[in-house]
Image (cartoon, coloured by chain):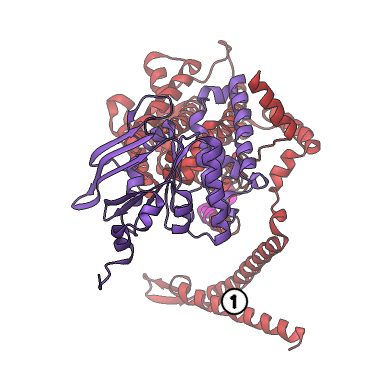
């Protein structure tokens, strides 16, 4: 089977600064992949490149949605990438704070809906049915991930852990085949992190999608990921299964610095 | 300390605060309110009476002000202790959702509207038509500013485009009102898109400045391009709207225009309400809340912005055509920045994104100055004071917009599921 996401020699320069230097990464079908590295290694820049917020300086981003043709996604607009089936969350939560939880999820559904201005103004049968289906679908998602009792609360009033969860649900509403999570466990306590771990596994197993996550919580990464990519100063310094990464000298050096005695 | 001692202590400190404020104000206003130099006879008149009045006045006002603030604080604390259940719908919303009040209420409003031009004088009808035009403008701008969060300070430009397209078409080609109504709206829409393109990348303050400039450009072009628009002299003798070629006197025409305007406003409310609760409306809200997250959710930012600008402008175009038909005369001085500011105040005062709020604010801002002509000298002062008070005590507007609560019963969900499988 072909990889769902194939990134080849991706480079991103900001003026003289090389944020990403010839980065490679693959995501296979139905796989959890982690991207780790010290602060400032270029992880979020990488996310922004593949989700269309930045246009990479050089390299290739090949996206192959399941049972569809490959697409070169360099410089595609963010909304087109989402339409293609790659949905993301943000490092610092970016919900729509003044809207209700259900509305947040319904906005995630936007790109899978068709109603136009005329349909909305005339409230045609098709628009009405679509609207009903959307409410039902989104409410179903909330039920499935345990936020249905908050459906009518404003997003800003949710507790922190629930906001993180809502961001994932909102991304799930876009029907992705690849979910990109930018530090989903940041700021969470141990119990919340364990919930998150279960949530990510559940999504992978039930929805048959792949997940690419950036994370600093090593225990979470080691127990979740099947494949780990390590970035340092914009370069890929290691890749492989969790066990290999744990014992990789280059990774230990990047995280802990050089051992003087060695 | 006993409770009475506490209370007296509190009272004393309050009196001290108010005294300080009044002394400060007396000092500040001393040069303008007390000293009066008579340059002809070369002497200075000391008007100590004014000083006393200012002292007493500020003492009193600061007292009332702090009393209101403490009440507001108490209300907030009360709401917090009650928790989320205390979050209730605003008064108007509760009335509108109460079936018992709603039906008779709508009937009374309908009767009032139907009878208005027959009971009151044409002058009153005329004012009412103006107010209704502003309701329409307010609802149009509400799409752009209130829902999509794009601060547009040049909205009056589209109003001008609508008015001038009817005026010019009528003056040069004798085009009638009914033909010009859609044409004016489409012209305004095109201008909305024209403005939309260059500002797609801008937001917030930058957007406000560009739209402000755009509004002025339109006005200055109309003012200075004499061959096209007849310059500051304007265009006169524009036809009033016809009704199947019927001849009407001025009063009859006012009545007709009034009913027409009522219908158009109802039409506007209807459409705007539906759009707000649609897929497109949610996209606008998302755009207002967070542009980057909005794009990440698969919403085409540029298209969504352009539709907001275009639709807002369309309604200004409609209103412009009606304005031209009502006054039978247009010139550039009707479309100054003050008008834009006025319409924007309606949206802000009424409550961003709230349809009933904008309607009420439009009536308040247009009708109050008309009926308070006695105080016309202080109009701007009162207006400013009212705005400041509003922002302090009701920052969300007269009728704050309440996010829509979607209803879903288990049965309803199941029936939808069934239907989708059929």
Quadrant in the picture for residue B395: bottom right
Quadrant in the picture for residue A81: top left
What residue is shown with label 1? B18
Q: Main secondary structure of the magenta part?
A: helix
Q: Position of residue B282 (x, y in %)?
A: 53, 36
Name above or below for residue B62 compared with residue A70.
below
Q: Quadrant of the C terminus of chain B?
A: top right
| Relative depth, front residue between B393 and B419 | B419
| Relative depth, front residue between B239 and B158 | B158
Q: Colour of chain B?
A: red
Instruction: Say if the magenta span includes residue B378.
Output: yes
How many numbered marks, from 0 up?
A: 1
Residue under the image location 56 percent in, 40 percent down: A105
Q: Quadrant of the N terminus of chain B?
A: bottom right
Q: Specify start and end residues of the magenta stretch as a single range.
A: B373-386
Q: Position of residue A20 (x, y in %)?
A: 26, 49
Quadrant in the picture for residue B219: top left
Residue under the image location 74 percent in, 42 percent down: B95
* Residue B269 visible in the snapshot: yes
- Is residue A212 left or right of B377 when viewed as pictured? left
- Is residue A71 left or right of A145 when viewed as pictured? left
Chain letter matching colour purple: A
């Amino acid at each position: 089977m072909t990889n769902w996401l194939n990134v080849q020699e991706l480079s991103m320069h900001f003026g003289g600064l090389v944020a990403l230097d010839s980065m490679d990464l693959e995501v296979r079908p139905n796989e959890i992949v982690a991207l780790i590295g010290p602060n400032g290694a270029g992880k979020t820049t990488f996310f922004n490149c593949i989700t269309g917020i930045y246009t990479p300086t050089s390299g290739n981003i090949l996206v192959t949605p399941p049972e569809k043709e490959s697409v070169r996604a360099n410089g595609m607009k963010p909304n087109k990438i989402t339409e293609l089936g790659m949905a993301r969350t943000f490092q610092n939560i970016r919900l729509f704070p003044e809207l209700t939880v259900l509305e947040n999820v319904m906005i995630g559904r936007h790109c899978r809906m068709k109603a136009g201005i005329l349909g909305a103004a005339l409230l045609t049968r098709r628009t009405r049915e679509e609207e009903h289906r959307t409410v039902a679908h989104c409410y179903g998602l909330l039920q499935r991930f345990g936020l249905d009792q908050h459906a009518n609360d404003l997003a800003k009033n949710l507790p922190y852990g629930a906001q993180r969860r809502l961001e994932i649900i909102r991304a799930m509403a876009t029907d992705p085949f690849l979910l990109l999570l930018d530090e989903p466990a940041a700021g969470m306590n141990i119990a919340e992190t364990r919930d998150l771990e279960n949530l990510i596994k559940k999504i992978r197993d039930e929805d048959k999608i792949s997940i690419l996550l950036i994370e600093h919580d090593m225990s979470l990464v080691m127990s979740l990921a099947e494949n780990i990519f390590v970035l340092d100063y914009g370069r890929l310094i290691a890749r492989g299964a969790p066990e290999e990464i744990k014992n990789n000298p280059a990774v230990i050096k990047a995280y802990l610095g050089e051992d003087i005695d060695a | 300390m006993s409770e009475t001692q506490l209370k007296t202590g509190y009272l004393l400190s309050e009196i001290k605060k108010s005294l300080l404020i009044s002394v400060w104000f007396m000092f500040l206003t001393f040069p303008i309110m007390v000293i009066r130099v008579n340059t002809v006879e070369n002497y200075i008149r000391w008007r100590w009476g004014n000083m006393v009045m200012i002292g007493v006045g500020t003492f009193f006002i600061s007292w009332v002000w702090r009393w209101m603030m403490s009440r507001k604080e108490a209300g907030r604390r009360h709401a917090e202790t009650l928790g989320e259940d205390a979050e209730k719908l605003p008064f108007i919303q509760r009335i509108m959702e109460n079936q018992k009040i709603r039906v008779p209420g709508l009937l009374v409003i309908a009767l009032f509207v139907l009878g208005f031009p027959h009971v009151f004088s044409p002058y009153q009808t005329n004012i009412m038509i103006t107010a209704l035009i502003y309701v329409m403008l307010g609802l149009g701008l509400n799409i752009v500013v209130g829902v999509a969060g794009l601060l547009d300070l040049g909205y009056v430009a589209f109003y001008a485009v609508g008015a001038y397209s009817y005026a010019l078409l009528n003056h040069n080609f004798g085009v009638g009102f009914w033909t010009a109504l859609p044409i004016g709206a489409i012209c305004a829409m095109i201008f909305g898109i024209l403005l939309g393109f260059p500002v797609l990348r801008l937001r917030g303050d930058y957007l406000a400045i560009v739209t402000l400039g755009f509004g002025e450009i339109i006005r200055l072009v109309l003012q200075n391009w004499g061959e096209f628009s007849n310059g500051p002299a304007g265009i006169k003798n524009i036809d009033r709207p016809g009704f199947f070629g019927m001849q009407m006197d001025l009063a009859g025409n006012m009545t007709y225009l009034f009913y027409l305007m009522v219908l158009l406003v109802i039409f506007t409310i209807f459409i705007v309400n539906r759009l707000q609760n649609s897929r497109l409306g949610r996209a606008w809200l998302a755009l207002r809340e967070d542009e980057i997250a909005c794009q990440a959710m698969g919403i085409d930012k540029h298209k969504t912005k352009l539709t907001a600008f275009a639709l807002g402008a369309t309604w200004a175009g409609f209103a412009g055509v009606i304005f031209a038909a009502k006054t039978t005369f247009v010139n550039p001085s009707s479309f100054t920045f003050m008008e834009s500011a006025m319409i924007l105040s309606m949206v802000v005062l009424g409550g961003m994104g709230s349809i009933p709020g904008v309607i009420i604010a439009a009536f308040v801002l247009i009708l109050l100055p008309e009926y308070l002509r006695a105080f016309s000298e202080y109009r701007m002062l009162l207006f400013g004071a009212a705005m400041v008070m509003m922002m302090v005590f009701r920052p969300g507007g007269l009728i704050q917009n309440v996010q829509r609560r979607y209803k879903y019963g288990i049965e309803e969900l199941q029936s939808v599921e069934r239907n989708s499988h059929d």
